[in-house]
Image (cartoon, rainbow, N blue to C red):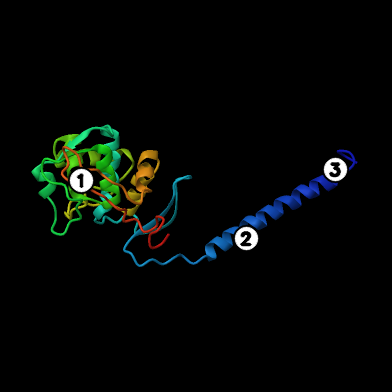
Amino acid sequence: NEGGPGYENSTSNNTNSGNTQSQVSAAAKAAADAITKPEITSEAGILYDVTNGRVLFEKNADEKLAPASTTKLMTALLVLEKSKLDDKVTFSKTAVTNLESGAVKIGLVEGDQVSVKDCLYGLLLKSANEVANGLAEHVSGSISAFADLMNAKAKELGCTDSHFVNTNGKHDDNHYTSTHDLALIGQKFFSDDVLCRMSDTVSYKIPASATLSQDLIPNSKNKLLPGKTYA
């Protein structure tokens, strides 16, 4: 027998194995195709696998939409890159007053001085809008100059449907992003241990000091954290 004992059986087994794998692959593809695409009520959305860089689900993922307070992910990311946690931020009149009516605030007033670390807790837990302004002025001297950094960073991350003109998500027709771009920004944000730790905090105290007139206690608005609505 050519090839020695068992030669024909080995060939047959390999052929059968190949056929089985083809059948399994075809069956898996058919099963995947048969899965009903999820329906969401929002205008746009994305489910992004950051480990493998894959989009698992999307709806209008490239549509330009107002990001609102998710803008602060980019703000926090840049502040941490461009400053030290123990730096002191002095809040100007512009920082504490250049806000939309009803904007979320933590209660800072002109002249207050707070560390970058404490500011980031106020930004990420309370979503405090005057904090975003003050951090931008600390890093760049003005909100518009900081917005230039935001746009440069967005381009660096591969964002193609984003443009920022402020630090906190205040409505402006020229301030927008897409869910795909937001996934890229979020991927970078959550790769940082410091930002993750801050974001996972339920409550934090910024103590009164010689440069801060009162205790400030930002509580997280994240409903997925322990003790919150969807925990």
Residue 84 coordinates in the image, percent (x, y)? 27, 32
Answer whether residue 229 is visible to the viewer in this image: yes
How far, Cα to Cα, is label 1 from label 3?
76 Å
Mark 1 vs mark 2: in front:
1
Q: Nearer the viewer, residue 50 or 99?
A: 99
Extreme-left residue of the structure: 93
Q: Badge 2 is on which residue?
A: 27
Which residue is at a point 26% across and 52% down the rendered structure image? 126
How far, Cα to Cα, is label 1 from label 2?
54 Å
Q: Nearer the viewer, residue 62 or 84?
A: 84
Q: Badge 1 is on which residue?
A: 131
Residue 125 coordinates in the image, percent (x, y)? 30, 50
- Residue 22 vs 94, above or below: the answer is below
Q: Badge 3 is on which residue?
A: 7
Is 219 on the left or on the right of 24, as rendered? Answer: left
Quarter of the picture containing the N terminus is top right
> Which of the two labelled residues, at mark 1 and mark 3, occupies the earlier sequence position?
3
Q: Secondary structure at mark 2?
A: helix
> Which of the two labelled residues, at mark 1 and mark 2, occupies the earlier sequence position?
2
Is 203 on the left or on the right of 112, as rendered? Answer: right
